[in-house]
């Protein structure tokens, strides 16, 4: 059974969006969502009601920027790209996530 998005720790979606844009360069929202789903091997499903509010939030924080362009199927689309501030935030979030995972792994170890 795949986890619901609500079960993903808060802030994780921001992290994976920033990571995706840092890795792939500018992408439109649909492309970002599909790439995240692909990398998550179907364990995470993102819909428009999830991805676009997150993109708006990241843009308002200055971590991503956007501009209008034409998608691969010749439709008008908004393309998002990570900013310098977004790269700094990505590095901080990756470090924080690594610490959190390490701590939880320690807590889950069988203590004898």
Image: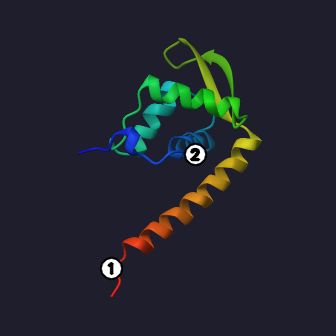
Q: Is mark 2 on a helix, strand or loop?
A: helix
- Residue drawn at x 72%, y 49% is 88
Disc 1: which residue: 110
User: 39 left or right of 98?
Assistant: left
Query: How far separated are the C-alphas under marks 2 and 1?
Result: 32 Å
- The first of marks 2 and 1 along the sequence is 2
Observer-nearest of 30 and 59: 59
Neighbour class for label 1 at 10 Å: few (<14), some, many (≥20)? Answer: few
- Residue drawn at x 44%, y 74% is 106
Q: Which residue lies furthest to the left in this view?
A: 1
Q: Residue furthest right?
A: 84
User: 99 left or right of 3?
Assistant: right
Q: Quadrant of residue 82?
A: top right
Q: How many marks?
A: 2
Would you place residue 22 above or below residue 75 in this image? below
Neighbour class for label 2 at 10 Å: few (<14), some, many (≥20)? Answer: many
- Residue drawn at x 68%, y 25% is 66
Would you place residue 21 above or below residue 67 in this image? below
Q: Where residue 98 sits: x, y (%)?
A: 55, 63
Observer-nearest of 88 and 77: 88
- Residue drawn at x 48%, y 25% is 30
Image marks 2 and 1: residues in contact by CB distance under 8 Å: no
Disc 2: which residue: 19
Q: Quadrant of residue 58?
A: top right
């Amino acid at each position: 059974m795949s986890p619901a998005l609500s079960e993903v720790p808060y802030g994780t979606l921001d992290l994976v969006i920033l990571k995706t844009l840092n890795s792939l360069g500018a992408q439109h929202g649909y492309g970002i969502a599909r790439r995240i789903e692909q990398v998550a091997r179907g364990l995470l499903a993102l819909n428009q009601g999830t991805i676009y509010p997150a993109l708006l939030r990241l843009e308002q924080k200055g971590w991503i920027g956007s501009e209008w362009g034409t998608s691969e199927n010749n439709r008008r689309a908004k393309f998002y790209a990570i900013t310098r501030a977004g790269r700094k935030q990505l590095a901080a979030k990756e470090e924080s996530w690594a610490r959190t995972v390490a701590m939880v792994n320690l807590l889950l170890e069988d203590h004898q």
